[in-house]
Image (cartoon, rainbow, N blue to C red):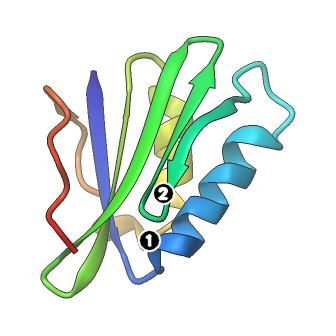
Amino acid sequence: MLIQEVTTDLEPKEVISRARVFFTERYSPYAGFIEDEGPTFIRFRVEAGTLMIGVGRRDGRNVVRGSTARLHHELSQFLSGLALPEEVRRNRIGRASALPAA
């Protein structure tokens, strides 16, 4: 599982809304179906497995984490649209961990 993270000033509701549009309405073989959704997370079922996006707070800003086993490029594309390029963090390989509590 590859975890990617970005810091943004967007509110969780806006991040989840953008994810819903990006991963369900794009004309792509990787378009997904929403499996589960809450105020700070959304999980998609896609042809290549599962993709999860969550939002939490850290140092007064929102942190968006995404994890997927196979759609790394698509996830990077989505996350890069949420923040300035210098704020996108490097990919980390490992287990998904909980976001900091809001």
Identify the residue at image location x=27%, y=36%. Answer: 3
Q: Position of residue 87 (x, y in %)?
A: 30, 68
- Vertical arrangement, residue 9 with respect to residue 33, above or below: below
Q: Position of residue 60 (x, y in %)?
A: 20, 87
Amino acid type, callout 1: Ala
Q: Position of residue 27 (x, y in %)?
A: 87, 33
Residue positioned most to the right = 27
Name the residue carrying label 2. Answer: 80
Specify few, some or many for label 1: CA neighbours under 10 Å numbering under 14, 14-19, or 20 or more.
some
Residue 87 as seen in the image, left or right of residue 32: left
- Vertical arrangement, residue 100 with respect to residue 73, above or below: below
Identify the residue at image location x=25%, y=39%. Answer: 91
Q: State the mark number for residue 83.
A: 1
Task: Tell me the quadrant of the picture where the C terminus can be found.
Answer: bottom left
Residue 28 as seen in the image, left or right of residue 45: right
Identify the residue at image location x=23%, y=46%. Answer: 90
Task: Tell me the quadrant of the picture where the N terminus can be found.
Answer: top left
